[in-house]
Image (cartoon, rainbow, N blue to C red):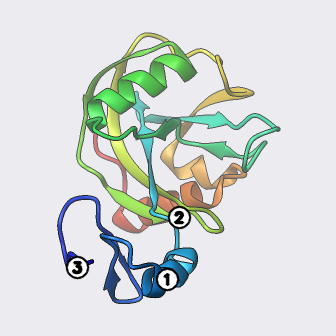
Amino acid sequence: MGRRESGPGLRQCSGQALGGIDVDSDLDEMRTCPPMPIRVLAAVIQRDQRFLLCQRPGHKRHGGLWEFPGGKVKEGESDLEAARRELAEELGVHVTDVGPVELSVRDPGSEFVIEFLPVTVQGEPRCLEHEALAWEEEGRLSEYELAPSDRQYVEARRGRGPARG
């Protein structure tokens, strides 16, 4: 069976493209190939010079830590569609706009890649899945016990200077 070198549905592992399976040579490589990253949207919501932080439920990964709300982007979903679905579920708000990705961070110890982007919402956020919510000034965000990727984002913002908007 021939091997396809590129195209939809293929991924690179150890310098080899995985396409048609050659049982003798591809099986061992498939077992050791790292999983494909799962894209997670983190909504940076700002109102009146304050940012929305949410405390993760205790039973979830990084439980009890604070984060920018969001969730996994489903295959074929745009950032706007994903933000609307996730923030309606988590906060009961309607997303009206999303901006470009400001920072992309690989979550340590997982297959998740967290992408932080500005999001505009209508409605008052409610705790539908989180333990607590807080609106905080940019200069005080680092005082919270943040999830690792969220801490990296806050530190990156601090290096850029004060928030706009």
Q: Name the residue under label 1.
A: 29
The 10 Å Cα crowd at callout 3, few under 14, some 14 to 19, many 20 or more, is: few
For marks 2 and 1, give the CA distance: 33 Å
Of residue 31 and residue 11, the one placed in the foreground of this image is 31
For marks 2 and 3, give the CA distance: 44 Å
Which residue appears farthest toward the front when viewing the image? 1
Instruction: Check the picture and name the quadrant holding the N terminus.
Output: bottom left
The residue positioned 53% from the left and 36% from the top of the image is 69
Where is residue 90, by image quadrant?
A: top right
Where is residue 109, by image quadrant?
A: bottom right
Of residue 4 and residue 57, the one placed in the foreground of this image is 4
Q: Mark 2 points at which residue?
A: 152
Q: Position of residue 14 (x, y in %)?
A: 41, 88
Q: Is residue 98 left or right of residue 127?
A: left
Q: Where is residue 8 in the image (x, y as percent from the top left)?
A: 21, 59
The residue positioned 24% from the left and 41% from the top of the image is 99
Task: Check the image and report above or below for 70 versus 13.
Answer: above
Pair 2/3: label in front: 3
For marks 1 and 3, give the CA distance: 17 Å
Label located before the other in sequence (1 or 3): 3
The residue positioned 20% from the left and 75% from the top of the image is 4
Q: Mark 3 points at which residue?
A: 2
The residue type indicated by label 1 comes to Glu
Secondary structure under the numbered disc 2 in the rendered image: helix
